Image (spheres, helix red, strand yellow):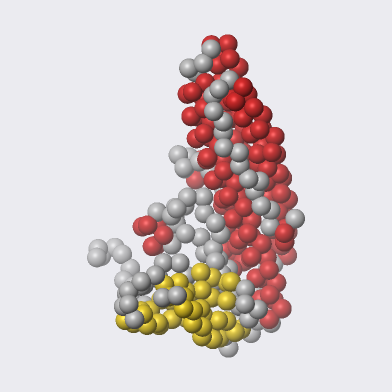
Amino acid sequence: MGGNKPFAGPNPPYGAPITYYLKDRGAAKIEILDGAGRLVRDLGAVPQDAGLNRVTWDLRYQGPHVRRAPDPEAAESGGGRGGFAQGPQVLPGKYTVRLTAGGQSLTRDLEVRLDPTIPVPEPELRTQLDINLKLRDMQSSVNDALRSIDTFKAELDTSEKTVRTLDPQAARVLVALIDERTQQLTTMEMKLARPDNIPGYSMGPRLVDRLAQLLGSIDRVLAAPTPYQVEHFNELKAEFLKDMGDVNGFIERQIPEINDLLKKNNAGAVMSGKAIEIPSSVR
């Protein structure tokens, strides 16, 4: 370790340690359920060795959907644009840990308690969680939209290569349409996320960044959102609904239009996408 780096000793993971025994090595799944039996968190890849295993739940909800699979190094450090995104902190209360392995499911109760030195009323924590879950779900929808845009652009690029082998007159019309639709997709993408090849200092944060930033700032403390944060949330919500409407409009109208022309010229078709789901809590 270099002398210019601060020293930090090893610490146990934050959260609730869960120890479990597997008779034989094999697939194992651990889920956290709330008091009503609703899924709060799937802990994903957990140790599956024969004997005793341990994993730690960080007392958070499932994170938002991601645009791309996270880079392993960034995910491990928890940072960077390729890293994972955390879900909101859970409320104090009773939860259930469910282990599924070897064709069986076992459950145990778990209680999350608030630090007694932090005097925060429960209604404030519920207000905080409500807005944080909405922000998480909006991030999920934006990343779903970005994945669809990535897919459409790749398929349009493939279609354009096929089209250029057709009759020159048909090719000119189709290539012009494909280029126009690709530019539409790029315009929508630029509103939702900063392209990977553009550094942050040369372009302000896009919608998905600002949703994550607001969630992080609200979730950082145990308190209800400030009036400014609520106002900013409402601004982002309006922008989110407008942008998701644009993406869904493209899926519902432009994709069928391109498919019809491609089929008429025996040039294949772009895979039709499914409309992006808008969270019911923010409609």
Percent of width and height locating residue 197: 45, 39
Percent of width and height locating residue 162: 49, 23
Seen at 41% across and 59% down, the residue is: 75
Locate residue 66 relative to residue 250 in the image: left or right: left
Closer to the camera, 196 or 202?
Answer: 196
Task: Judge whether 283 appears above or below 272 on screen.
Answer: below
Locate residue 125 relative to residue 212 in the image: left or right: right
Task: Judge whether 87 appears above or below 106 on screen.
Answer: above
Percent of width and height locating residue 36: 65, 78
Task: Judge whether 44 appears above or below 165 on screen.
Answer: below
Outermost bottom residue: 116
Quadrant the C terminus occupies: bottom right
Outermost right residue: 283
Percent of width and height locating residue 26: 36, 71
Quadrant in the rendering for residue 3: bottom left
Task: Judge whether 260 appears above or below 204 on screen.
Answer: above
Seen at 71% across and 49% down, the residue is: 241
